[in-house]
Amino acid sequence: MSQPSRLESDLITPITRFSPGFFAVIGCLLVVIAVAAYAWLHQLVFGLGMTGLNRPVFWGIYITNFVFFIGISHAGTLISAILRLCRAEWRRPITRMAEAITVLVLFIGAGNILMDLGRPDRALNVLLHPNFRSPLLWDVTSITTYLTASTLYLYLPLIPDLALLRDRVPKRRWFYRLLALGWTGTPRQQHWLEVAISIMAVLVIPIAITVHTVVSWVFAMTVQPMWHSTIFGPYFVVGAIFSGIAALIIAMAVIRKAYRLEAYLKPIHFNNLAVLLLVMACCWFYFTFAEYLTTFYGNEPDEMQVFWSKITGPYAPYFWTMVACCFVVPVPILALRKGRSIPGTVIASVLVLIGMWLERFLIVVPSLINPRLPYRGGIYHPTWVEGAITAGAFAMFLLFYCIFAKLFPVIAIWEIREGQERGIPETVERLKTYLPTEGPAGAAQPATERWGVWR
């Protein structure tokens, strides 16, 4: 067996070494998860009365978390697929981190639905008594499809690295051998792997867009004030990509620091993602402005009650904090080149995640408190049970991600090697095809000949 290269050593060593800091982090996460488990048990025993949910506010923080986590799932599969199809070479160190976020966070999002149901066995009603006219069934179908496709899309590029780990990590050889599926790296295997990855990259893009569109339809198919909107589909998709990119940037910064991967996750990667984040911030503001402007211009009484509750009423602090976190503060940071440094990008991303969680909360709760039905108006104050379970959901996601990072390379080793060996010459050749060809004497071809006009 050959000696491991520096590339292999840099990316495999963090998997096999366990520092005291790692165990400290795992211990803290387990404590939070244990408190959340106790809160859930308390809710199971005493019912949903232990939460702030009531009539007419039957959705609260749990559904806010569900929409938020499903949105973050767009960080991986969608972004990775687009960058891969565009042959963006700078994608290579970040795609696997992004794809892992997608798969892991989907479990957390679906888990919040079980919390909201109160009794987990009620989830079986969707299967035992399906109603095909219900957007809830559409939601279950689309998320299941997305989870399956994203898992396959994460697994396929892992296979060459699993085979490498099978040969380099003797203590876990049985585990990696099982997952590597007999990969030996023959030209035939490589060909079919590239074909399979390309097919999945094409398939997952419409699936990812469909998922968050269907999530938005769970709201938009009702006539609740400020939910019955035709732009909710693209509005949710834009918000999902927005929060997904922010989550990916934070994950990259943490992994870079913890695993000392400064040579692989360079400032240029953060800069490029920061530009994407800036574009999505502008798109988010456009959709938010359009949504609220049409509501204000329509002046429908029930909708205006929700509208003013957000703008000047009891939810105004949340609304203006959301605007500040999603647009007012991040945009100047990201617009300046100096602001797109690693610390600046991380600060902007943290603000975006806070703002996007508030946006989901403001979509869910104020509309339910002010329904069209003849209620006097509801109230909603989350209890410690919901707070503990929410903290546990975030801790569970971080725990899953830590375990993933200790089992698999967070950066695709074979893709980095491929980029070093083939990526540079292929990029040069591709660049030449973008530029005008030169004539036999070395001069550029005249414009009149290129376009065939003005002769």
Image (spheres, helix red, strand yellow):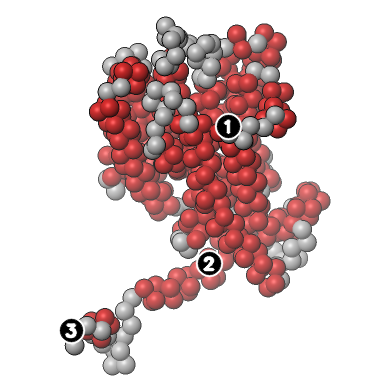
| Residue located 44% across and 14% down the image | 373
Q: Amino acid at mark 1?
A: Ser
Q: Which residue was labeled with disc 3?
A: 454
Q: Amino acid at mark 2?
A: Gln
Cα gap from disc 1 to disc 3, whole angstroms? 61 Å
Q: Secondary structure at mark 2?
A: helix
Q: Secondary structure at mark 1?
A: loop
Cα gap from disc 1 to disc 2, whole angstroms? 50 Å
* Residue 355, quarter of the rendered image: top left
Residue 233 location, x and y as percent?
44, 39
Q: Which mark is residue 134?
A: 1
Check the image and report above or below for 440 versus 243. Answer: below
Check the image and report above or below for 208 versus 114. Answer: below
| Residue located 34% across and 38% down the image | 287
How crowded pointer 2 is (Cα within 10 Å; few <14, some 14-19, many 20+) is rated as few
Residue 241 location, x and y as percent?
45, 43
Residue 278 location, x and y as percent?
34, 44
**Left or right: 278 with respect to 214?**
left
**Left or right: 79 with respect to 448?**
right
* Residue 418, quarter of the rendered image: bottom right
Outermost top residue:
376
The reply to whether residue 213 is visible in this rendering is yes
Q: Which residue was labeled with disc 2?
A: 420
Given residues 114 and 151, the one toward you in this image is: 114
